[in-house]
Image: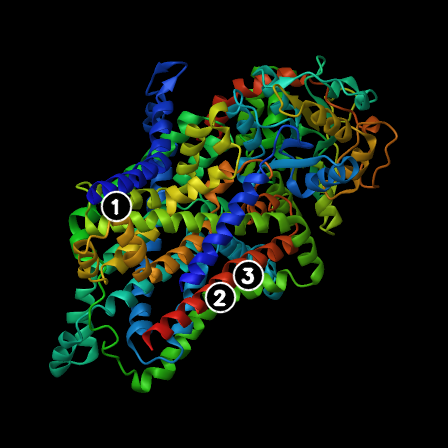
Amino acid sequence: MKKILYAILALTAAIAIWQMDSVPKLSQKIVVVYVSEDQVFSEPVLKDFEKETGITVKAVYDTEESKSTGSMNRLIAEKNNPQADVYWANEPIRAEVLKQRGIAAPYASLEARDIPSVFKDPEGYWTGFSARARVFVVNDRVKEKPKTILAYIDPRWKGKSVIANPLFGTTTSEIAALFTIWGDERAKAFMEKLKQNDVALSTSNGESADFVAAGQYDFSLVDSDDAVNRSRQGKPVTMVYPDQGAKEPGCFIVPNTVMLIKGAPHPEHAKKLIDYLLSPKTERKLAFADCAQIPLHPSVQIPPELKPIDAIKVMEVDYAAVAKKMVEIQAFLKNWTGL
Amino acid sequence: MPQLQRQVFLGSIVVLLLIVGLLPLLSMLFKSMIIDGHFSLEAYRGLLASRHQWVLMRHSLALSSWVTLLTLLVGVPLGVILGKTDLPLRRTFAVLFVTPLLIPSYIVAVSWFDLLGSEGLLADLLGNPVAQMTNSFLFSLSGCVAVLFTIFLPIPMLLTMIFLRTIDPSLEEAGRLVSGWFGVLKGISIPLILPAVLLAAMLVFLLSFGEFSVPAYLRYDVFPVESFTQFSAFYHFQAATAAAVPLVAVTLLLLLAEALFLQEKTYPLRPSATIGRSMTIALGPYRKGVFVLITLLGFVIVILPIVVLLIESAGMDAYREALDRAGGSLLHSLYYAALGATLLTFVGFFVGYLIHHRTVRYWRMIDSVTIFLFALPGTVIGIGLISLWNTPWTNFVYATPMIIILGYLAKYTALTSRITAAQLAQISPSMEEAAQVAGAGWFRRMVLIVIPLSWRALLAGWIVGYLFSLRDTEITMLVYPPGYETLPVRIYTLMANGSPQLIAALCIIMISATLLPAALLWMLYHTMTTKEIK
């Protein structure tokens, strides 16, 4: 028995020494990235980067429960003790919050020169790529499809629509964007009318899409990848880009964003990773993956379910203003949801 | 001088335990009261003012109470049947029912989702309307209770089995002279093991109250989920700490109750000298019926969910992708669990020694601290660890897997210390005393007498430490350094939009990684024990 105990001790000591040796050193070819894009989509891209550059990627991914903000909050917690080099966010608002908190460093990648300026921070603190559009997913039994976000408050659809909890994720961003383009008064009135029109609340965009696919509701505002996925699974749904009319505000676009972290331990490798993520090649991969994201570089090939970015009427917003508004309306939204 | 050696060494172990376990909590509490550089109780005022907090409290209490009630109602009779009757395959059944406790809790939830969810196996078999009903059941209080019931059922079952063996058989023999087995169980056996039943109730209540992953997966709002969300999704450090306060308060209250009503009765856990001679209940004509019933229960709550995962993951492609994506994480899990188990065995052994021999005046406080940390939700310990170690000067801990190991040590020392204390109770103190009289110093006595005599506790402690470190999700998810995630964390992050086949394959890999090494070590332990008895 002593022999077994000694064997366990020896094994453990060997593991401890090996693990100590595997702790990264500054001179090693590594880059640390915090990722809020779903791991299932982002990890293959990071693996390809490793293969092509020989730089090891150490990543921290978000869980569903942290609602894509866990890694951002880890960055805030580590402001005075930065561990990450790069932040890959799945939308621009959190990147803007990090910029405002002094956690980002400017870096203008040459790979981003063809990306429209509306999707880039003017001071170079973050750059957008591969976007989702906020679209309607509509059940096929509905003959006349809703065409504008105002359908939510149209009595014709009373009790027939669903929206994800506006306290989380891209729904919060879109509501904040509406506040910036409509003004507080009109936006708050819209939110009140949502309640009056018996709009149901779901826990996530994915759940909303499932409800519509199952025929429990007629339509919902979701991310384009949620709609494309249900359609690829053969569910009876159609994707509609809302507010495309001349006098309508356009479709809210949510690009992924990437930023360099201030005080990054490996800045040179970080810049290489940022260049890689912003390249047309990465955008093509993300367009054909299950996340079906819309490339922001012109002329990148896309799957048939998607429209190219220049064929969509895009909601013109200032993402910095949206980020500020999002913080401002937190209390209103909490109150609205009854928390 | 030898006394001094002992006191200094054990004192160092206590200090280590306090630094690893209590200091992070104190740091967290302190930081929650400092807002913009000034002392403020704003976060706590917010806690009392919010209606939502009372809803959470109601949810948490309802969940823990139902789980406790159901596990006791089923677990105690199950423990009696498996521990005291002549039912065939009793040991096999006991191992079967323990299985869900050994694997990460949310994997059990995933398997039930694959069976009862809107696109689960039942939906394929019985159609959409039935699936909608079962899906609604699963994503509710009832679903949470059902899943946690299957996970925590082994606790009352095992405690009942163990404590029934400690009853002096002459009491039951006397009872049998005037009554049938039902009367003996009702009048003698069960009242005698009541402290064990209450201990089981307390453990199940605390573990359900602190459970994060199952309510989070099934979207049922309880305090641990709120605390995690406040920290991880909003980075409201103060609010996260405030949301953890009710968890800490309930844990402390129950531990206080344990100290008042149970400790003297259940500690030390001293199996009677008459072990092996305990009376067996002959089931007679009911044997077949009870066997079928137990088989059915085991099939529904343990085998069926695993079979569903196997069906869902069918095909080599899912396993190839799972190993490709998570092979590294699997190795991390195994390394950290092995390291954690060794440290837990070492620290737990000396803490157990200290508690058993009452070598310091505050031994009971040390025991309570370890139990308190075990009962505390992992999310709270994780937040505390970040609060203490996230500084440029302590990166050797914060930026390395050492932070994960410290988390294991903080949370699971109670298990190894209690196992040691129970084993030491069976070793005659005269051995150590004789060596002391012969002039052997404390370290010498430990190395040559106490440790060799306690090998069973050391090995059992290592196995338990390994299993609990391997299944840990809550602490690891909050603190893992970049690139050092474990398999349970990797599965959790892949669950966002990962294909059901991939998730099911990962769950099966996790279950195998837990059960296979555990079974091998247990067989080894069993063989060695049998050899020694012969």
Q: Is residue A247 left or right of residue B74?
A: right
Chain letter of mark 1 equals B
Residue B237: name its quadrant.
top left
Front: mark 1 or 3: 1
Q: Does residue B106 lie above or below B314 as drawn? A: above
Q: CA distance from mark 1 to mark 3?
A: 33 Å
Q: CA distance from mark 2 to mark 1?
A: 31 Å
Front: mark 2 or 3: 2
Q: Does residue A208 lie above or below B173 as drawn? A: above
What amino acid is labelled 1 in the image?
Asp
Residue B172: x and y in percent read 16, 76
CB atoms of marks 2 and 3 within 8 Å: no
- Residue pictured at 45% horizontal, 49% vertical: B469
Asked whether the viewer can see residue B366, the reply is yes
* Mark positioned earlier in the residue sequence (2 or 1): 1
**Residue position for label 1:** B367
Q: Which of the labelled discs sits on residue B512, or is there none?
A: 3
Quadrant in which the C terminus of chain B appears: bottom left
Q: Is residue A206 left or right of residue B468?
A: right
Q: Does residue B299 lie above or below A113 as drawn? A: below
